[in-house]
Amino acid sequence: MRILIVEDEVRLAATLAALLRRHGYTADICHNGVDGLDSAASGIYDLLVLDAMLPGMDGFSLLRHLRDGGSALPVLMLTARSDVSDRVRGLDCGADYYLTKPFEPTELLACIRSLLRRGGDHRSDDGLAFGDLRLEQGTFLLTCGERSVRLSRREYDLMELLMRSGKIIVTKEQLLLKVWGYDSEAEDNNVEVYVSFLRRKLSHLHSQVHIKTIRLVGYCLEVAE
Ligand code: CA
């Protein structure tokens, strides 16, 4: 799951990103509203954590532009003020939830889980399952029966996307965008290399699940009979 943080307080943004990464999410940061809107509208994010007061374009305007453009991206708004009018304004602009700073990390994580569930992510705290595989969010452990292997960050992101899509084909382009991000220099070749790492790990796990290549398109998972 890829989360965008638009927050101009550099230290707070870094702290939030570190917290999210520790909990298995991929997190990118923008420090101003204009770049924030650009990234939020890119379609590669699963959730937006949006500060209300931003240089360039404030969070309310950003959100209005985003919604006007037809985006249904879940948005968690952050504000330094507990002002009711601010809260109402945020919700009117299309925020899904509102948190007042300072907040507890556990509260933020609970909001994020709840918003992602609404968006169709039914992952519980104990991980994501497909076939005989289980992928654990906090520890990056991929488990099959008694065996387990620890995945690297990229392997985890790739495996998560494949497991969430299951038998539906994920294109190489989607994998590049979701796993490497859209500013990245990564190429198709990187995807192939990481898929081969994952295949090696799946075979080590003796899993019935295989990553199937759909030539010139992408990949999907299949379960051997
Ligand atoms: Ca701010």
Image (cartoon, helix red, strand yellow):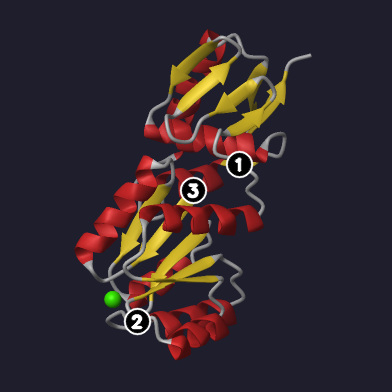
Q: Do we see residue 115 in this rendering?
A: yes
- Disc 2, SS: loop
Density class for disc 3 (Cα within 10 Å; few <14, some 14-19, many ≥20) is many
User: Cα distance, mark 3 to mark 2?
Assistant: 33 Å
Q: Nearer the viewer, residue 135 or 35?
A: 135
Q: Is residue 44 left or right of residue 216?
A: left
Would you name the residue on which mark 1 appears? 123
Image quadrant assignment for residue 212: top right
Residue visible at 40% across and 86% down in the picture: 83
Q: Mark 2 points at which residue?
A: 81
Residue 23: % across, % down: 41, 42
What is the distance, in whole Å, between disc 1 and disc 2 at their CAs?
A: 32 Å
Q: Position of residue 109 (x, y in %)?
A: 45, 53
Q: How far apart are marks 3 and 1 (CA)?
A: 18 Å
Q: Which amino acid does label 3 sit on?
A: Lys
The x, y position of residue 164, in whole percent, is: 63, 39
Q: Is residue 118 above or below residue 89?
A: above
Query: Which marked residue is nearer to the observer: mark 3 or mark 2?
Result: 2
